[in-house]
Amino acid sequence: MAEWKTGQIILDDCLIEKELGQGGMGRVWIVKSISTGRRFAVKQTLDPDAG
């Protein structure tokens, strides 16, 4: 799995603003849509087979 970082663009339109939290299954990031300006959370799983 690729490591995500603050300031990185993911999913072609989402700027990673900050890490919200981390647990056993993955990390949750606050991201901002470049096209709409809306903010939302994205979960990055640590194990590709995890739910």
Image (cartoon, rainbow, N blue to C red):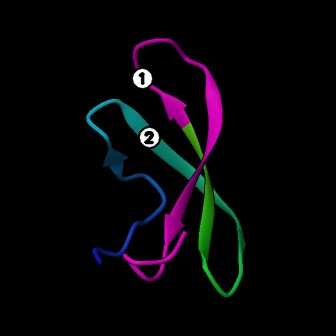
Q: Give the range drawn in magenta.
A: 32-51
Asked whether residue 48 is drawn in magenta, I would say: yes
* Mark found first going from the N terminus, 1 or 2: 2
Residue drawn at point x = 29 percent, y = 78 percent = 1
Question: Does the residue at mark 1 contact the one at mark 2 (Cβ under 8 Å)?
Answer: yes
Q: Position of residue 27 (x, y in %)?
A: 60, 71
Residue drawn at point x = 65 percent, y = 35 percent = 40
Q: Quadrant of residue 25?
A: bottom right
Residue type marked 1: Ile
The mark found on residue 49 in the picture is none
Q: Mark 2 packing: few (<14 Cα in 10 Å), some, or many (20+)?
A: many
Q: Mark 2 points at which residue?
A: 15
The mark found on residue 34 in the picture is 1
Residue 17 placement, left or right of 1: right
Q: Position of residue 46 (x, y in %)?
A: 47, 81
Seen from the viewer's position, the closer of residues 31 and 48 is 48
Asked whether residue 10 is drawn in magenta, I would say: no
Task: Specify the quadrant that holds the C terminus.
Answer: bottom right
Q: Position of residue 9 (x, y in %)?
A: 33, 45
Helix, strand, or loop for circle 2? strand
Residue type marked 2: Leu
Residue drawn at point x = 31 percent, y = 40 percent = 11
Q: Position of residue 38 (x, y in %)?
A: 61, 20
Q: State whether residue 23 is above or below residue 33.
A: below
Total numbered labels: 2
Helix, strand, or loop for circle 1? loop
